[in-house]
């Protein structure tokens, strides 16, 4: 397995992975649109590839103040092999190299298994209120 940056030929495989991993995501998280929007800003999409197939992915962002991780996904049949951990470590290393000193992420409150996974990587729950607004 290798971890590398996104290439345009990854589009279909990444869309399939995110669609399968996040089947109940809201419409604004539609994978094709996420890829398009991300590539307008930068190419911080990391791909886990095995036997020429995309088996995991992680999108990262940096606004000059904080880094973020988004859409961390590993295909169902490849979970529990350390793939997500390797993707996250590569994303964090890249963010650190551009000057990032803190990385944030958001998960659904009821997703306790994923919370435990991130805690095992050193992430902690912070007392914050997450707010958002859709710009029409």
Image: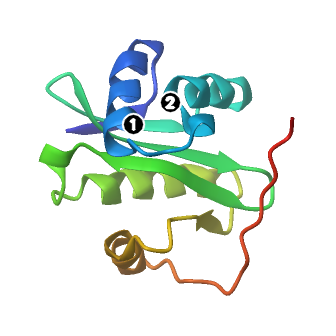
Residue 71 image offset from top left, x and y in percent: 48, 47
Query: Across the whole image, how many numbered discs are drawn on residues?
Result: 2
> Which quadrant, please, contains the N terminus?
top left
The residue under label 2 is 31
Q: Is residue 79 left or right of residue 109?
A: left
Give the distance between the C-alpha atoms of the residues marked 2 and 1, in whole angstroms: 6 Å
Q: Residue at x 78, y 58 (%)?
A: 132
| Residue at 66% across, 58% down | 67
**Residue at the far top in the pictured view:** 9
Quadrant where the image shows the C terminus: top right
Mark 2 and mark 1 in contact? Answer it, CB < 8 Å.
Answer: yes
Mark 1 surroundings: few (<14), some (14-19) or many (≥20) residues within 10 A: many
Q: Indicate left or right for 11 with 78 as reference.
A: right
Q: Position of residue 122 (x, y in %)?
A: 45, 79
Work out whether 78 lies above or below 30.
Answer: below
Q: Residue at x 33, y 60 (%)?
A: 85
Q: Position of residue 76 (x, y in %)?
A: 19, 47
| Pointer 1 residue | 18
> Which badge, 2 or 1, is on the more N-terminal residue?
1
- Tell me the quarter of the picture where residue 26 sits: top right
Image height check: is 6 above or below 20?
above
Image position, residue 120 (x, y; %): 35, 79
Give the residue furthest to the bottom.
127
């Amino acid at each position: 397995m290798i971890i590398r940056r996104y290439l345009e030929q990854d589009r279909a495989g990444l869309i399939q992975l995110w669609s399968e991993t996040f089947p109940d995501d809201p419409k604004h998280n539609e994978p094709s649109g996420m890829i398009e929007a991300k590539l307008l800003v930068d190419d911080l999409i990391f791909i886990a590839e095995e036997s020429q197939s995309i088996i995991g992915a992680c999108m990262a962002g940096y606004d000059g103040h904080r880094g973020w991780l988004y859409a961390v996904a590993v295909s169902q049949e490849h979970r529990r092999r350390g793939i997500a951990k390797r993707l996250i470590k590569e994303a964090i290393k890249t963010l650190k190299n551009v000057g990032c000193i803190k990385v944030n992420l958001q998960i659904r409150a009821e997703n306790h298994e994923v919370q435990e996974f991130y805690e095992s990587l050193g992430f902690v729950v912070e007392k914050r209120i997450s707010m958002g607004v859709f710009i029409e």
